[in-house]
Image (cartoon, grey):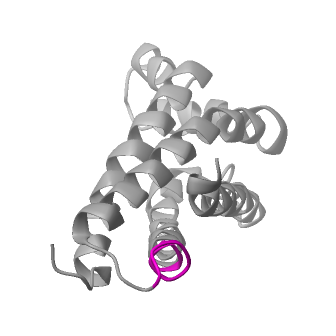
Amino acid sequence: MKKFEIELKWASAFTAISIAWVYFEKYLGYHDTNVSSQPIFSFWLMVPQALIYIVAIRQKRERYYGGEITWQKAFISGVVLSAIIAGLSPAAVYLMTEFISPEFMSNIVEVRAEQGLPREGLEQIYNLNTMLRDAIFNNLATGVFFSAIIALFLKNKKV
C-alpha cells in the first residue's frame, strides 16, 4: 500500500475537488436556471483535474523515485491514479446526485425535452446508473490521456 500512497492521496484530492465543483455549479445556478449551459461550465473542471495529475506525478518522481523517472513509470503512476479515481467516482456521483443536487437530472431532462429531444432517450442518459458508468469510464479515459501527455513532460531519465 505504501507504494501507491501518493496516488491515493491525490485521488482523494481529485474527488474532493470534483465534489466541491458540483457545489459551485449548483451555487451559480448551473443545476437549475442555467442547466442548459452546465456541460460547458463543467468542461472547465478539467483544468484543476489536470493540475492534480501534474502534481501527483511530479510528487511521485521526487519522493518515490528520488527525482528521476522514466516516461513508463510516470505513465503507470498516472494510470494507477486514474484507476483509484475511477474507483472513488461511484461514491462521489452518488453523493452529488442524491444529496448535493438531487434535482439536477430532472431539470436537465426538462430543459432538453423543451428543446425537442425525446424524453425517453433523455431519461436513459440522465439517470444514476448511466452517470455512475460514465463517471468510471470517463475518469479512466481522461486519466490515461492526461497521464500519457504529462509523463512526456515530467520524465527526466533515459531508459
Q: Nearer the viewer, residue 140 or 4?
A: 4
Query: In the rendered image, which quarter contains the C terminus?
Result: bottom left
In magenta stretch: residue 62: yes
- Residue drawn 57% across and 54% down? 4
In magenta, the rendered stretch is 58-66
Say above or below: 63 vs 74.
below
| Residue 134 picture quarter | top left
x, y (%) of residue 119? 46, 19
Looking at this rendering, what residue extends furthest in the left direction? 159
The location of residue 75, given as percent across then percent down, is 31, 61
Q: Residue at x 60, y 64 (%)?
A: 6
Q: Is residue 5 magenta?
A: no
Farthest residue toward the right?
Answer: 99
Which residue is at 45% across, 66% downward?
46
Residue 138 to residue 156: above or below: above
Report the label total: 0
1 or 71: nearer the viewer: 1
Q: Position of residue 52 (x, y in %)?
A: 53, 71
Q: Main secondary structure of the magenta part?
A: helix
Q: Position of residue 62 (x, y in %)?
A: 50, 83
Residue with the most extreme top position: 120
Query: Looking at the picture, does residue 6 appear above or below residue 157?
Result: above
* In front of the other: 88 or 128: 88
Residue 35 sits above or below residue 59 on the image:
above
Q: Residue at x 43, y 86 (%)?
A: 67
